[in-house]
Image (cartoon, grey):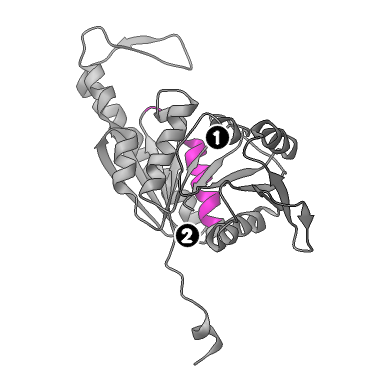
Amino acid sequence: MSELEDKPKRAPRRILAGFGSAGDEIQTLDAALALARALHAEIAGHFIEEAGLINMASLPFTRIVRSHGRAVKDVGASDMEREITEAGRAWRRRLAAGARRHQLSYSFAVTRGDYCIELKKAASPRDIVIVNPENVFKNRRAALLSALGAAEEAAGAVLIPRRAFQSVGPVVLIASEGAPSDTALQLVEEIAKAENRKVVIITPGGTTTADEEGLETLPFNQTDVVRAVDAINALYPSYLVWQQGPSPELNDELLPLLDATDGPLLILKG
């Protein structure tokens, strides 16, 4: 048996990028392309035609106000359908152009319904799902819950920031209920290597250590969330990764920990 045959074969990863009809999807596209390059993964673009927008457009008092001007116009359901259909085609073209530029495999699908529900239905166990909070219409907690829901059907989910973000800080992995898994370590190391970043691991009861590979472990006492939040803020991570434990509920102690970064948040199954 050859040396190559001795190496375990890994199932291909897929980045499932959720494009919606309500949000600005430039950051969705950028995040999907960057993650696919880092993980050598295929991109599956999924455009959701938000049924609520079409239903709202059928109401007689609905108007559209353009963000780049003060023009106001009446809109009906057929007008909204045309706009949404054209938006889907535009994001298909942009995804195809970006994938070809970086020599990535890609696919694109369109469904109609609720953004979060459709993304969850489209996810498969080897996917990492990109969730844009602008398509959730609610607050940070609702966006986090949507990402958690998508992660239930996939290997993980990324909640992208609401605005453009750039940091030279490390990739920070929080293993909230024990030691990080081999899969989580491998994934964060691949992301860090692609961006030339250090990896910092925050784990319960850990000791502060560093080695020649740039891995560092910081202690994390779950009863002292403020201390952990301060540590994350000081690190200003380029990526915050949370490895879920056996009980991944979004409780009030965990929320500030996951909200301690302005950058992307990757939720991984434990």
From the top left corner, tell me how far across and down residue 101 is, in percent.
51, 55
* Side of 155 relative to 79 (left or right): right
Mark 1 vs 2, N-terminal side: 2
What amino acid is at disc 1? Leu
Q: Sort mark 2 into few (<14), some (14-19) or many (20+) by Cα contacts within 10 Å.
A: many
Element type where label 2 sits in the image: loop
Which residue, given by chain and number where applicable, does mark 1 sit on? 254
In the image, residue 32 lies in the stretch drawn in magenta: yes
Which residue, given by chain and number where applicable, does mark 2 sit on? 41
Give the residues in magenta: 22-37
Above/below status of 252 relative to 96: above
Residue at image x 72%, y 48%?
A: 218
Asked if residue 51 shows in the view, the reply is yes
Q: Sort mark 1 into few (<14), some (14-19) or many (20+) by Cα contacts within 10 Å.
A: some
What amino acid is at disc 2? Ala
Picture quadrant where residue 42 is located: bottom left
Element type where label 1 sits in the image: helix
Residue at image x 25%, y 7%?
A: 61
From the top left corner, tell me how far across and down residue 29 is, in percent.
48, 43
Above/below status of 219 relative to 3: above
Residue at image x 55%, y 41%?
A: 265
